[in-house]
Every structure is written in structure tokens, then in C-alpha cells.
Amino acid sequence: MRAIVQGGSGYTGGELLRLLAGHPHLEVAQVSSERLRGKPVAAVHPQLRDRNELRFCGLDDLEPADVVFSALRHGQTAPRIDRTLALAPVVVDLSATSGSTTPPTTPAGMGGSTPARSCSPASCTGWRSCTASRS
């Protein structure tokens, strides 16, 4: 399975990349960071130096995959959930928003209230998986 990690330059993204690097059935195809676009992922996460040759890309440069892991900052996944769901049938949101029992929203003070759609309870504490039906 091909995976995308959105927001891969922070601590959560780095730990996720480290864990996924050892996964026998997942290949990380793309890692996004607007700030570090074009730079090697290993330059930010030296623990991955011998594990991949990925470079960061922008969110708008992402191509379809099987799963998207979103490690974006709090409140940044929900406003772009439709674009993210267009990339993969499964989205796992690792942001702080994902721990609630209601669909994630962007607080009014951060630009409005945008609920994610079709969110199901997480199988792991603190993770929420969002899926969309594809025709």
C-alpha cells in the first residue's frame, strides 16, 4: 500500500515516518511540508537517513495513494478534508482535533467551522479514521 504523510516535518510526522519505515506492507510515497518543500526528509529526521530518499513536497503536489496520514497542526486537517479524501479512500488524522468524539471542526477563531465527513470511531486511542465512498 502506498501512503502519504501530510505535515511530515514535525515531531508527530517524524515518529510516524520512523514507524512506517519498518512496516512490511506500507510504502511512504510522499511527505508534505510547505516550509521544507524540496528538502530531503532525512535532513530534518536524521533517524531516517538510511531508510529512504524522500523529499518534502507541497500539499498541492500530492498524488493519489491508498492512505493519507495527516500530521498537520491542530485545526488544519478539517478545512482541507475534501481535498485529502480525494487523494485516498482512508485518512488517519493524527492532529489534536482527532481525539474528540465529534467530527473535527476548525474553531471559529481559526477561520470557521468545517466538519469532516463520514468520521468513524478510531481503532486506536487518539486516532480518527475518515473515509469517503468513491463512485
Image (cartoon, rainbow, N blue to C red):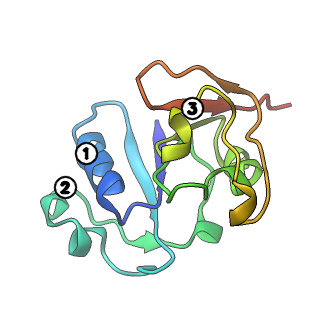
Which badge, 2 or 1, is on the more N-terminal residue? 1
Query: Does the CB distance between marks 1 and 3 fall below 8 Å?
Result: no
- State the CA–CA distance, disc 2 to disc 1: 7 Å
Q: Secondary structure at mark 1?
A: helix
Q: Secondary structure at mark 2?
A: loop
Three-letter code for the amino acid on which mark 3 is drawn: Ser
Relative image position of residue 102 (x, y in whole percent): 67, 29
Three-letter code for the amino acid on which mark 2 is drawn: Arg
Name the mark nearer the viewer: 1 or 3. Answer: 3
Query: Does the CB distance between marks 2 and 1 fall below 8 Å?
Result: yes
Looking at this view, name the residue that lies furthest to the right: 135
Which of 101/130 is in front?
101
Relative image position of residue 13 (x, y in whole percent): 36, 54
Crowding around mark 3 (Cα neighbors within 10 Å: few <14, some 14 to 19, many 20+) is few
Relative image position of residue 108 (x, y in whole percent): 75, 58
Identify the residue under disc 3: 100
Identify the residue under disc 1: 21
Which badge, 1 or 3, is on the more N-terminal residue? 1
Answer with the quarter of the image where residue 26 lies: top left
Residue pictured at 30% horizontal, 75% vertical: 40
Task: State the quadrant of the C terminus.
Answer: top right
Relative image position of residue 80 (x, y in whole percent): 71, 56
Crowding around mark 2 (Cα neighbors within 10 Å: few <14, some 14 to 19, many 20+) is few
Q: Give the label on residue 59, or none.
A: none
When the figure is inspected, residue 96 is found, relative to residue 130, above or below; the finding is below
Q: Secondary structure at mark 3?
A: loop
- State the CA–CA distance, disc 3 to disc 2: 34 Å
Which badge, 3 or 2, is on the more N-terminal residue? 2
